Image (cartoon, rainbow, N blue to C red):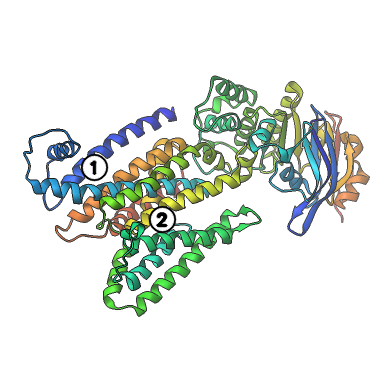
């Protein structure tokens, strides 16, 4: 099991967001986490990446409890791409990707041949090689997100976590970024856990969907069994019609007006 | 590519610093030619040379000019490195070494010392020999930082926005206490306090250089050693955490190292503004944001800038000295505005 979460309860101060969440993610899965605002999607990511201490419960990565790992050990097994990384400083794409080697290097020594090879592979895998010398401040949102995924790949993780990676992108870049995630998942066996806002993108790309309601699992399984009209109405409180995607065959959610 | 440019700038700046040191040491009411400066230094270092210079030149150079020029160098380095590191930590290019209220705390300490302790000669050795002003300024600086730091730390974590706000609040509080002292003290002490707060290197001596050196060496080494982590921090605190950076440790280390550098500078030279703000900016334009080059290059460029500013301060008006803090503000202010405007313009 790649990631195991047992009875995870955590939140901010007195406000509990996740309430006894259980989750297992096996090697090679593409799990999409969906749910309305406040259902605990981002809190889950923060807890897994140790940005938030659980009030109760355990999180295990490859069978080892994450708070027993050092920050560097954790970063070698798991990489996280945030919603949108606003970078106000003029790093080049290659410099950003090289930063992904941080958990492998000692404080004083420069990059090794191994580091450079990993950076090269990450650039190639994400199609960011032509951008290597460009400044990140001059990239489009989609290019920047691909650069951040390349940085994550340079960490050579077994689990890639993305927190709403397409939130600020226009549709062509949304597809570009998620296509990349799917390719990495299918061709390299990288386990992907992505928080997604868009149910249709979740249905189209994920091998399994986790639908959260109020900090706990409401339903989980293949998209067709989770993203049903009844489930979506129960969790989001909005009326929808679910049809079949004409090309992919996955469920497609159509919003209905209330009027 | 950037790395090559970084190394090139480091070499150029080192050469420039050595040149500026020799030239600046020769400038003053008694002019000493650069060649003579070098000869005197060699002779002092124990090389057997036939003196071709008057004895007074040797004394002026060794006892007055050199400690002052070196102090300007050390303070310029300390402020620039602290500024560069803080700009990285706060991910804000407007952060400067004084964001944590260091200068206001030091001003309060210095004002207290001038108003109440200056005339007291205590038969104490050691630290007290520094004089009450640097000592209390240093303590005031550290006191302010400690207060700001503890205000912003909640549940073992430091909130960076809280830190900025607490820095502003503690700073204004300390400055209003300074105003209170100014209001009630006699005019002589008032003049001394105001003059001290403008920042100056007039009181530099070998003793103070000796005290400043370990702070600089340790602060510089610690900050440069954390260059990579600071680079990752520029991607945001949350992202840095997932990249293997222990962000809480990093924040503490950088804050404390920067605060010590700044406190030591303020104690010996008063609050000299703009160096720590402008120099890292300028260096970033040349070598990019990689702290492994940015910090050492900022140290060198900062040293050059402050040595030049101090030379102007003590030679521009002949015998009358202008506080170097004023010179820096007058040169740095417009320069900073120019940079700001340049950044605001669309590509």
Which structural element holds mark 1? helix
Percent of width and height locating residue B210: 32, 48
**In 3D space, how far apart are the residues under numbered discs 1 and 2 (Cα atoms)?**
24 Å
Q: Residue at x 85, y 31 (%)?
A: A246
Residue B341 seen in render: no
**Figure quadrant of the N terminus of chain B:** top left
Vertical placement of residue A132 versus B198, above or below: above
The residue that mark 2 highlights is: B263
* Dot placed on the residue nearer the N-terminal end, 1 or 2: 1
Give residue B21's mark: 1
Q: Determine which quarter of the picture holds residue B300.
A: top left
**Is A150 or A231 nearer to us in this picture?**
A150
Looking at the image, the residue that sits furthest to the right is A230
Residue A97 in picture, x, y percent from top left? 57, 30
* Residue B66 shows in this picture: yes
| In this view, the mark in front (1 or 2) | 2
Residue A181 image point, x, y percent: 72, 30
Residues behind callouts 1 and 2 on a single chain: yes
For label 1, the crowd category at 10 Å Cα-Cα, with few meaning under 14, some 14 to 19 and many 20 or more, is many
- In the image: residue B265, left or right of residue B17: right
């Amino acid at each position: 099991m790649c990631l195991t979460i047992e009875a995870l309860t955590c939140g901010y101060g007195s406000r509990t967001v996740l309430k006894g969440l259980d989750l297992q993610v096996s090697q090679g899965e593409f799990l999409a986490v969906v749910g309305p605002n406040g259902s605990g999607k981002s809190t889950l990511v923060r807890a897994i990446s140790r940005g938030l201490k659980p009030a109760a419960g355990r999180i295990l990565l490859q069978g080892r409890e994450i708070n027993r790992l050092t920050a560097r050990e954790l970063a070698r097994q798991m990489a996280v791409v945030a919603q949108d990384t606003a970078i106000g400083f003029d790093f080049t794409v290659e410099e950003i990707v090289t930063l992904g080697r941080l958990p492998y290097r000692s404080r004083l020594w420069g990059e090794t041949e191994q580091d450079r090879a990993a950076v090269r592979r990450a650039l190639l895998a994400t199609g960011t090689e032509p951008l290597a010398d460009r400044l990140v401040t001059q990239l489009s949102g989609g290019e920047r997100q691909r650069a951040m995924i390349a940085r994550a790949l340079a960490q050579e993780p077994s689990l890639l976590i993305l927190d709403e990676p397409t939130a600020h992108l226009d549709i062509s870049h949304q597809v570009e970024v998620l296509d990349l995630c799917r390719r990495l998942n299918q061709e390299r066996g990288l386990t992907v856990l992505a928080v997604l806002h868009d149910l249709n993108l979740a249905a189209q790309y994920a091998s399994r969907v986790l639908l959260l309601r109020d900090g706990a699992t409401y339903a989980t399984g293949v998209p067709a069994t989770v993203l049903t009209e009844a489930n979506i109405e129960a969790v989001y409180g909005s009326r929808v019609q679910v049809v079949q995607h004409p090309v992919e065959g996955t469920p497609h959610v159509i919003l209905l007006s209330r009027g | 590519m950037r790395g090559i440019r970084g190394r090139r700038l480091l070499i150029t700046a080192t050469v420039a610093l050595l040149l500026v040191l020799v030239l600046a040491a020769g400038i003053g009411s008694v002019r000493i030619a650069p060649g003579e400066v070098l000869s005197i230094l060699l002779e002092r270092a124990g090389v057997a040379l036939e003196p071709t210079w008057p004895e007074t030149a040797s004394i002026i150079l060794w006892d007055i000019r050199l400690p002052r020029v070196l102090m300007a160098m050390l303070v310029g380095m300390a402020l620039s490195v602290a500024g560069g590191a803080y700009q990285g930590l706060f991910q804000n290019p407007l952060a400067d070494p004084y964001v944590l209220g260091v200068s206001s705390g030091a001003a309060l300490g210095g004002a207290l010392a001038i108003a109440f302790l200056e005339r007291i000669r205590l038969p104490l050795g050691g630290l007290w020999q520094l004089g009450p002003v640097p000592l209390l300024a240093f303590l005031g600086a550290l006191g302010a930082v400690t207060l700001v730091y503890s205000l912003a730390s909640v549940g073992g974590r430091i909130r960076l926005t809280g830190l900025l706000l607490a820095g502003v609040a503690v700073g204004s509080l300390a400055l209003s206490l300074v105003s209170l002292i100014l209001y009630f003290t006699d005019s002589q002490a008032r003049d001394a306090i105001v003059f001290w707060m403008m920042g100056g290197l007039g009181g530099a001596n070998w003793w103070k250089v000796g005290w400043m050196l370990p702070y600089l060496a340790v602060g510089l080494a610690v900050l440069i050693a954390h260059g990579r982590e600071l680079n990752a921090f520029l991607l945001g605190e949350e992202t840095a955490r997932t990249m293997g950076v222990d962000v809480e440790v990093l924040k503490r280390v950088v804050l404390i190292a920067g605060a010590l550098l700044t406190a030591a500078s303020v104690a010996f030279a008063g609050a000299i503004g703009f160096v720590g703000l402008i120099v890292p900016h300028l260096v970033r334009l040349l070598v990019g944001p990689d702290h492994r080059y940015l910090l050492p290059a900022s140290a060198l460029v900062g040293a050059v800038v402050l040595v030049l500013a101090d030379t102007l301060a003590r030679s521009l008006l002949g015998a009358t000295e202008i506080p170097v803090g004023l010179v820096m503000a007058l040169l740095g202010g417009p320069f900073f505005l120019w940079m700001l405007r340049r950044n605001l313009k669309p590509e």
